[in-house]
Amino acid sequence: MTTSIVNTAIIGAGQAGLAVSYYLTRHSLDHVVLEQADRPAEAWRNHRWDSFMLNTPRWQSRLPGVQDGRQDPDGFMPRDEIVARLEELARPLPVRHRAHVGEVEHNALGYYVLKLDSGERIRARNVVVATGLYQTPKIPAISAAFPADIKQLHSDSYRNPEQLLPGAVLVVGSAQSGAQIAEDLHESGRKVYLAVSRAGRTPRRYRGKDANWWSAKLGHYDRKVGELPSPKAKFASKPHISGTRGGHTINLHQFARQGIALLGRLEGVEQGVVTLAADLHANLAAADRFEADFTRAIDVYVDATGMAAPPESLPALTDGFAQPTLSKLDLRTADITNVIWATGYAFDFSMIRLPILDEDGYPIQTRGVTAYPGLFFVGLPWPHDAKSGLIYGVGTDAAYIADQIAARQTSETAQLGQANFVSANPLPTIRTTRRRLFNAFASSVLAFILEGFAVHAAELHQAVASSTASCAADTVAEPAESTFSPR
Ligand SMILES: Cc1cc2nc3c(=O)[nH]c(=O)nc-3n(C[C@H](O)[C@H](O)[C@H](O)COP(=O)(O)OP(=O)(O)OC[C@H]3O[C@@H](n4cnc5c(N)ncnc54)[C@H](O)[C@@H]3O)c2cc1C
């Protein structure tokens, strides 16, 4: 078993982990990024479908330190381009791939001990957890009751229509992913049934500007987590919108008009017949209301500021309401041979062996900073504000965490220097510069010695612990159960 020491270990090389690494590098702080996949940008590369394009325009999708060569701030990046941008960001950074962190413990000497699957141990003064919230595809238990000849997959592993069996597709869940995948399939000529869930809708453009531009103007992205109506509101689905075809509105009424069959929420399946809730029209009405509230807020803003924005009335589509509210649907009769579960993701931070999770399994922190010195989170939705979980906000959050780590380093070095040298050596004022240099050198030496001591002490502690079969991890509280994060 090898053991190494690093000042800061970052877990995850998605945009959040890489952004923290970028800022730590600018602070010249020693660190490593540990990524379980064999390349960076795993989530975008291997967990989005082929035709996927970012929903956020380019001006909102810039990564720290990466130049976007395209002169198209209002355009949308295809999947492969965001992957390329993340690779560019990762290239000069200290990223280790195929490094899955299984456990993080906090030892008595104030070190975090990261246990890698390979058996390697890494001791770090700081740990930044950047594993995202879209961790494990969530498939409801009722999937087990579907006939065996139906192909089932999660939106996480959907790539393109060719990977499906011939026949119709039932897409379960109509938040951003479900609605976009339903459209992708429909455009390929598939018959699509969409079990509609509750999600809002924003028009892609209104009164001459993109919806996200208006959201920024209206201050939506600056809303702080404390302003949410409840802690669970952090996990609310995002409204329908799309970045494909230069960016366009996704409207379920339009889907109905084009021939996509809209259904209520999927409740169960028995003998190849699915049961459906009677909530289709209520869900459609909720999406309509969301859009009306959004455009009303823009109108009020335009009136209040007097800005020039051409008036616009959006088409009031109602086709979805003409769809029958089915309570049952026979899969065979409908020729449904495929089911795509667009039902969100589960997240789980139990690898951190400390009682840091709230009742939803979400890390307890303020702006990514936990009560445990040196333990940080980046990339969650709403650790701070509405843009934290987006590329748009990750740079600011990452810079903030890197600053915290730098400040911690400075204060630790100062404490060591003060405790051991300043009081013992009250040098005259004329020798201040020499004293500072001496202190800096001496505290580095001391830190080095202490670090070595800490490793040996921790190893000794561990050896004793394992010989008495009482691992330190057993004594800390078990983290709360994981919960689910709908998109
Ligand atoms: C379908 C979809 C569309 C989205 N569209 C947009 C959009 O248009 N614009 C936008 O701004 N945001 C979008 N998001 C939200 C967000 O930007 C992405 O989810 C983004 O991938 C989050 O980045 P991250 O770095 O926080 O996490 P991730 O990208 O998920 O990265 C986490 C990394 O940690 C690694 N990891 C996990 N556990 C371990 C471990 N134990 N040890 C080592 N490594 C580990 C993973 O392999 C992964 O590489 C979208 C999300 C989804 C699901």
Image: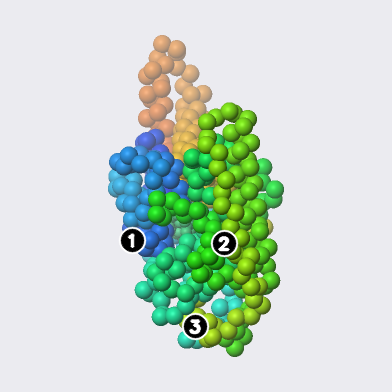
Judge by depth and name the residue closer to the eye, 351 or 159. Answer: 159
Front tag of 1 and 3? 3
74, above or below 415, in the image = below
Secondary element at tag 1: loop
Judge by depth and name the residue closer to the eye, 207 or 179. Answer: 207
Q: Would you name the residue on which mark 3 appears? A: 335
Using the image, tell me which numbered label, if any, was put on residue 38: 1
Q: Would you name the residue on which mark 2 appears? A: 253
334, above or below 60, in the image = below
Q: Residue at x 30, y 41 (%)?
A: 69
Position of 346 with respect to 228 (left or right) is: left
Q: Quadrant of the C terminus?
A: bottom right
Secondary element at tag 2: helix
Mark 1 / mark 2, whichever is N-terminal: 1
Residue closest to the far bottom? 271
Judge by depth and name the residue closer to the eye, 331 or 120. Answer: 331
Using the numbered discs, state the Cα–Cα distance from disc 1 to disc 2 in whole angstroms.
42 Å
Number of numbered discs? 3
Three-letter amino acid code at the position of disc 3: Asp
Mark 2 / mark 3, whichever is N-terminal: 2
Position of 162 with respect to 126 (left or right) is: left
Three-letter amino acid code at the position of disc 2: His
Q: How many other residues sit within 10 Å of disc 3, few (<14), some (14-19) or many (≥20)?
A: some
Using the numbered discs, state the Cα–Cα distance from disc 1 to disc 3 in whole angstroms.
39 Å
Using the image, tell me which numbered label, if any, was put on residue 164: none
Q: Which residue is drawn at 54% across and 85% down?
A: 333
Q: Residue at x 64, y 46 (%)?
A: 293
Three-letter amino acid code at the position of disc 1: Asp
Mark 1 / mark 3, whichever is N-terminal: 1
Can residue 16 be seen in this snapshot? no
